[in-house]
Image (cartoon, coloured by chain):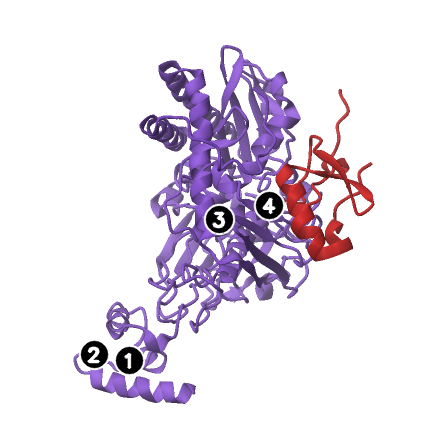
Chain colours: A purple, B red
Amino acid sequence: MSLAEPTTRSGDQEIATDPFLLEIIRNHLITTCREMGIAMMRTSYSPMFNEALDFTCLVFDGKGEMAAQAPYCPAQIGSTVHLIPSTIGEIGPENLNPGDVVFTNDPYRGDAHLPEFCVIKPYFHEGEILAYSVNIAHMTDVGGMVPAAFGDTRNTWQEGIRFPPLKIYREDEEVEEIFRILISNVRTPKHSYGDMKAMIGSLYLAERRVDELVQRYGAATFTQACEDIKLVSERLMRAEIASWPDGEYEAEGLIEDDGVVPDRPWKIKVTVVIRGDELIVDFTGSDPQCMGAANQTFGTTASAAYNGALHMCRSEIPYNHGCYRPIAIVTEPGTFVNANYPGSTVGGNSDTHPTTVDIILRAFSQFSEESSAADGGTCGCIGFGGEDPRTSEAYAHLHLEGVGWGGRDKHDGNDVQFVKNGNCPNTPVEVAETRYPWLNMEYQLEPYAVGHGRHRGGFGSRRVFRFLTDGVNIASHTNRHRARAWGLEGGQDGTNTVIAFRRKGETDWVRAREAFGVQSYGKFSGITMNTGDEMLFVTPSGGGYGDPLERDPELVLEDCGLELITTAVAQDVYGVVVDPENGALDRAATDELRAEKRQGQR
Amino acid sequence: MTVYREVNEMPKCASCGKLLPVDGIRAERLGRPVQFCSDQCVRIFDTYKQPKYGDAALAGIPEIA
């Protein structure tokens, strides 16, 4: 079977597979992807995989189109729509043999950024490729100038080692030379080797599961089912888009800086075009590519477009290639949303992507109440590296952190949740402290700081690290230190990120720009912490949705009781009066105060 | 070793801007040869991008060697 030309429109074709059998096969494939992930968790070496779950497992059909995915990282999932057919096409399916595994991490070829290592294994049946199992995962360290890649890099060579599509397994045998090149270019060779083997192991697992289907139902039925799985999703997606009003909806937003040029914000502009059952997400008008690492690759931008569109869907649509067919992307190469080689892009996938999604949602908000205010807009990517005195071995760790999400029409924003481009849990304190030379002195919700609204944003977190050894090398690529998550429909903006440091024995926190002379509060590298030094990390809250005066007074009271907001804020912002004696809601005084405040708004 | 092409030597789709490591659909638009990654992108270029942006529709799209 050869790779297909990407389909323009196939939603009108007849679904040939029996609907019950179709559900069985579809769910078998989705479960296969979940099982691949569980295998990854149990066999990988790095907390990025076995705790933060920064990976995605998929099954593609013989045409190189996605047949199934499990709900891991949306940023990775969207990029594979382009990366997988492109990679298979470049290698040539005719050059693949049973037992081969193809590997790439090239951000310019469709990958989201350099640390996303992608491995692909063809499944052969009677000499024909019927499917590909795919694993794309965020490798913690990829060499380069900073541990764990994130900082103020200016080009791809500073980011780390780049592999164009190549075979890392030939007929079930490791291509030893490739592994040697890889592990000799990273700070954590044992972990990188183990993590790669975990990724590849999951491909073999998926191959067995796909083979079970083919053996049970036959190759023809399997192939037809893959087609029909995509058709069902395409129909559902087109119906969803068709329910939206035709038109062009523009929005734009800013990334506060690139870590290289101080105080220079970078604009992302999006025009969402709805034409019947087709959606165009057009990024024309976005700024030129920046000098730092905040640029998005094409794969990241396409993924953000899919992410935004799928957030707007009210119906349950099985996610596969069919969902993406009705969505067209328009970008200009050489811009902030489609960086040209050798531009640095590592932060674009992690920290620009969430804001891109929020800008798309802002465009959707012009006609839909399914949208939301902006979220905290940063993954909290802080890289730590050095030598652990307990083992005398080098370590590299990428810290991720949750933020407050934006309020929505019907709900408050989530608290301390990873931004919309990933589903990554934080690494538990106990795991981090066991594996790395630091302690967590504080870890809590950051109260009193939030975007107020009828539905308020979610709260961020506050964490203090204390380092237990000298020479901890720190780099960061984070946002919202100056720009804030915006509110919607009268909701207030969220609050900022704070990263600050203090040397042992000092009492005042000092931010990186003032303490170390770097160009940015959130995008920097080369900061060294020593024994007893501490670092403060406060993540941003989400924007509010709707007028705070319309918030249910009982919810305001509940927030006061949980010490998330003060009674003064309840009164000043929400017009809710709480009796200082007994902490009860004073309804009469609240009604009177709200009436006064509304009068003042006119 | 076979000839290795670096990514800056490869064409990009005239509509979506995606890199094309393997040849796409060859066409001519605005008086110059271009490539598209799919039929969908051909249609989007002809019915949306070029009518909206005119000569600027190929901004940033590298010339095909």
Mark 2 and mark 4 lie on one chain; the one further toward the N terminus is 4
Circles 1 and 2: CB atoms closer than 8 Å = yes
Of tags 3 and 2, the one toward the viewer is 3
> Same chain, marks 3 and 1?
yes
Find numbered disc 4 in the image and state the secondary structure of the residue it sits on.
loop
Q: Nearer the viewer, residue B41 or A428?
A: B41
Residue A307's disc number = 3
Q: Nearer the viewer, residue A238 or B21?
A: A238
> Same chain, marks 3 and 2?
yes
| Chain hosting mark 4 | A
Residue ID for mark 1: A576
| Chain hosting mark 1 | A
Mark 3 and mark 2 lie on one chain; the one further toward the N terminus is 3
* Residue A162 coordinates in the image, percent (x, y): 64, 35
Q: Quadrant of the C terminus of chain A?
A: bottom left
Mark 3 and mark 4 lie on one chain; the one further toward the N terminus is 4
Residue A146's disc number = 4
Residue at 66% x, 37% y: name it: B37
In the visual, does A59 lie left or right of A92? left
> Same chain, marks 3 and 4?
yes
Q: Quadrant of residue A198?
A: top left
